[in-house]
Image (cartoon, coloured by chain):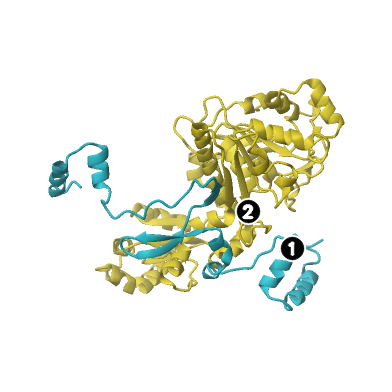
């Protein structure tokens, strides 16, 4: 398993040599630096022993309570979202703590944070405070609503954004969807700003709002209102512009397949597969006219087949059809297995678990899991020596002041 | 504890919320540090001031549609970096820019390709 030293260097990975300080929590604050770490960046996650990251205590009844030797709790979810990074434990409210965080930020290329309003200012780590000393630093600030505007001071979780943007009305109250959306947008803009800093010497403050990244990916739901002044119409399974988009019941308990027919050609293909030439349209308008009958016929045809049978038969005919899968189905899915979408990771406290592999599949330098999630403070000494050049006496002084915590060697 | 008290809490919260609008409840909750929000439909979200004040939407001059409003850049930066640049291109709108100005082909070649149905 990866050591602190091997996590430091991503060797020939795309982002090797880039240093990232992650002061984040929950999904967006961890996934964004995770993306950079698994592309080779040296990412350090700054945490407190007194106030550990919230994800560590996201207990669910089907998971046992798991504790690290330090007594801090951990979970499978925390382990999954903080892997491939190094862990540095700093108590900001202790003497030397805030200065240590500021010094780490000064050694970094990118600082990522998603703390509540005012926290970075209290730590002396806001853009205004850091940029005079570190002009090339890129700061990515991820928040629910952005740091300005009428709701700029609001607190939010992913589910808040889902409800605020209207996704919960159109789809379902997904608690984390917009965390991931913001995380990937954040990784992209942070790398862009890093390259700008390399070219010009000037850093950037990136105020990334989950509302705005969510707006971007939900644009099709807003366009009819924005462009045509039409009220939004409820139709959760309807894809705008498609002749027919629906889910059909299949053989099996709560078994469904999702079907989208874009144009008259698609409907003609389906009519051929179902041996219903009477449902083959002559034009797009004819396809729209026939759509209710096509949906009824498709429902009857699918009832005697499983979702996978419906999907395979219609995919072979050239139609965009998918089985509606549960998480168990996804875990078994032969396509994901064949693509290497899961990787086994052994953790000293959690045990052996399968986790999603990095989805960034560049041919020569694919993103990949570089190491298990570290225990809280497992890399504190190594990072402070490596990044800040602190000596053993400096480290012991900070530790004696309660400003840092390092996992004892025999607990690593 | 919250799961065990679900029904009781639901009763209290329902009574409490019946005395005020959702927006009032959210505003007071946020002031107390509660991460609550109004539940919007997609078109109701578009009526909220916040994204407009933040510049989340831009006015765009479309060749076909005239002036339309679309989602803008996904990040606000200091200094400003991301900006709306161009409308969606009309099919083939950049042929001359790319084939002639960037790749060095002549306008005559483009005419020939067009006649042969290549572009």
Q: Residues within 10 Å of mark 1 (few under 14, many from 20)?
A: few
Compared with A314, A104 (above or below) is: above
Q: Indicate the position of residue A362 as horizontal and vertical percent values.
A: 46, 35
Q: Indicate the position of residue B114 as horizontal and vertical percent values.
A: 16, 48
Please give the name of the residue rendered at 42% of the width and 57% of the height, measured from the top-left corner.
Answer: A321
Instruction: Using the rendered view, name the quadrant where residue A96 is placed.
Output: top right
Image quadrant containing the N terminus of chain A: top right
Front residue of B70/A133: it is: A133
> Does residue A332 appear anywhere in the picture?
no
- Residue that numbered label 1 is attached to: B31
What label sits on residue A147 in the rendered view?
2
Front residue of A259/B82: it is: B82
Image quadrant containing the C terminus of chain A: top right
Q: Residues within 10 Å of mark 2 (few under 14, many from 20)?
A: many
Q: What colour has chain A?
A: yellow
Chain under callout 1? B
Chain ID, cyan in image = B
Q: Indicate the position of residue A356 as horizontal and vertical percent values.
A: 58, 42
Label 1 – label 2 distance at C-alpha = 16 Å
A295 sits left or right of A190 in the view: left
């Amino acid at each position: 398993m990866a050591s602190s030293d091997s996590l430091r260097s991503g060797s020939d990975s795309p982002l090797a040599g880039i240093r990232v300080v992650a002061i984040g929590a929950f999904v967006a604050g961890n996934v964004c630096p995770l993306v950079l770490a698994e592309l080779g960046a040296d990412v350090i996650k700054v945490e407190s022993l007194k106030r550990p990251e919230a994800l560590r205590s996201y207990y669910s009844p089907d998971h046992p309570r798991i504790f690290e030797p330090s007594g801090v709790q951990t979970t499978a979810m925390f382990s999954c979202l903080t892997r491939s990074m190094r862990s540095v434990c700093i108590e900001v409210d202790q003497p030397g703590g805030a200065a240590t965080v500021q010094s780490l930020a000064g050694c970094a290329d990118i600082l990522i944070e998603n703390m509540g309003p005012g926290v970075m200012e209290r730590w002396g780590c806001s853009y205004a405070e850091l940029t005079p000393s570190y002009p090339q630093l890129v700061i990515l600030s991820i928040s629910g609503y952005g740091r300005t505007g009428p709701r700029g001071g609001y607190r939010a979780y992913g589910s808040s954004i889902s409800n605020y943007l209207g996704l919960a009305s159109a789809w379902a109250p997904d608690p984390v969807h917009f965390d991931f959306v913001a995380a990937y947008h954040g990784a992209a803009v942070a790398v862009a700003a890093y390259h700008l800093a390399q070219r010009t010497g000037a850093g950037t403050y990136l105020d990334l709002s989950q509302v705005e990244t969510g707006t971007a990916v939900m644009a099709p739901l807003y366009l009819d209102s924005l462009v045509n002044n039409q009220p939004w119409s409820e139709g959760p399974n309807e894809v705008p512009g498609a002749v027919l988009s629906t889910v059909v019941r299949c053989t099996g308990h709560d078994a469904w397949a999702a079907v989208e027919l874009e144009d008259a050609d698609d409907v003609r293909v389906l009519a051929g597969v179902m041996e219903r030439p009477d449902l083959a349209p002559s034009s797009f308008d004819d396809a729209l006219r026939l759509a209710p009958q096509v949906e009824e016929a498709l429902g009857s045809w699918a009832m005697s087949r499983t979702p996978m049978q419906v999907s395979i038969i219609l995919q072979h005919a050239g139609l965009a059809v998918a089985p509606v899968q549960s998480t168990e189905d996804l875990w078994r899915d032969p396509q994901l297995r064949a693509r290497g979408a899961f990787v086994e990771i052994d953790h000293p406290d959690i045990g052996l678990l399968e986790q999603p592999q990095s989805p960034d599949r560049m041919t020569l330098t694919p993103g990949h899991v570089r190491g298990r999630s570290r225990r809280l403070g497992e890399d504190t000494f190594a990072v402070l020596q490596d990044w800040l050049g602190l000596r053993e006496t400096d480290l012991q002084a900070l530790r004696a002041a309660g400003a840092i915590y390092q996992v004892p060697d025999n607990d690593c | 504890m919250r799961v065990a008290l679900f029904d009781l809490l639901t009763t209290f919260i329902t009574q409490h919320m019946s005395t005020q609008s959702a927006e009032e409840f959210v505003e007071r909750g946020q002031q107390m540090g509660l991460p609550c929000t109004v539940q919007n439909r997609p078109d109701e979200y578009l009526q909220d001031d916040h994204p407009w004040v933040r510049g989340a939407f831009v006015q765009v001059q479309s060749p076909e549609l005239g002036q339309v409003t679309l989602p803008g850049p996904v990040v606000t930066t200091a200094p400003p970096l991301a900006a709306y640049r161009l409308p969606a291109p009309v099919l083939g709108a950049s042929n001359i820019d790319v084939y002639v100005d960037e790749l060095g082909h002549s306008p005559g070649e483009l005419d020939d390709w067009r006649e042969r149905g290549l572009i």
